[in-house]
Image: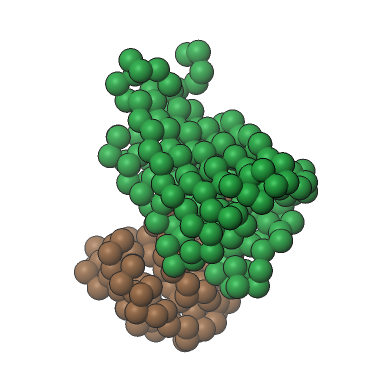
Amino acid sequence: MKLEEIAKLIGADVIAGVDKLCTLDIDTACGADLMSDVLAFCHERTLLLTGLTSPQVVRSAEVAGLSGIVFVRGKRPGDGVIELANALGIPLLATDYPMFEACGMLYRAGIGGTYRLSRAEGRGC
Amino acid sequence: MTARDERALEMDFAVARQDFAAAGEVASRVKQVLRQLGIASDLVRRAAVAAYEAEMNLVIHSSGGKIVLKVDSERIVVEARDIGPGIPDIELAMREGYSTASDEVREMGFGAGMGLPNMRRCSDAFTIDSSAGRGTTVTAAIYIAKPGS
């Protein structure tokens, strides 16, 4: 699913990475507020949904090779975080839906979780 | 690492205590360097994650230190060296969920007692050398080629 369709589905504003709306394909997502879990268990090219807006979220996405970040629950990052995301080429979306609803809407639309990939690799979680 | 290894490289990156604004810059740099060396993406990712957790540990817990990146044809080594205060109980520090981090750190998404276990998870070889008052060296090695192969 293109990033543009995801943004429409969860009513999200695009606050960084508009140029990737029509080009970036997403088929996997995860929801997490703990960046160590993101680093340990998220696979590359995963879309991260989170309620945290610190610069470390963008850094974690870059280090783990994630596709992009959705801030949930009406959270909006500061200008420094947006600048960092633009510099690193990481798209940022922001939706008013809480974590559970936003994840549920994406899952119902066919976006898979990371567990199936971990199981395929023989990893626990 | 041997002097004859054409891919041998060693780089130091300073990490300042409590510098949360810069936290993650070293890991980004490590990832960039490894990519430029043409190393496979899954190995780059594991090394970058280990470097990021090491960097966060230095920022959060140490009195300052550095990340040393060493690469040769056989392995990537990410070494975090600090000047203190040292880990009083390494076994406890390695337990998932054990943390002495502040609420400020937790609000950034870290400090849940996963840093060292995550580094070990990313590594093929992992060591901690520490004692209270002397400082700590954490070494994570990721094999490019299996030793002896």
Instruction: Give left or right: position of B84 versus B59.
Output: right
Viewer-closest of B114 and B4 = B4
Q: Is residue A51 above or below residue B70?
A: below
Q: How is the image coloured?
A: by chain
In the rendering, what colour is chain A? brown
- Up/down of A125 relative to A19, above or below: above
Image coordinates of residue A40 in percent, x first then y, are 56, 51
Query: Depth check: A11 or B87 in front?
Result: B87
Q: Position of residue A117 (x, y in %)?
A: 52, 48
- Say which quadrant the N terminus of chain B sits in: top left
Residue drawn at x 32%, y 42% as measured from the top left = B33
Front-lying residue, A91 or A79: A79
Q: Position of residue A96 (x, y in %)?
A: 47, 86
Q: Residue at x 66, y 36 (%)?
A: B129
| Farthest residue, direction top | B148
In the rendering, what colour is chain B? Answer: green
**Residue beneath the point at 44% across and 57% down:** B24
Q: Position of residue A97 (x, y in %)?
A: 50, 84
* Picture layout, residue A35 above or below residue A41: below
Residue at the spot x=68%, y=56% of the render?
Answer: B113
Q: Is residue A5 visible?
A: no
Q: Is residue B95 left or right of residue B141?
A: right
Residue B104 quadrant: bottom right
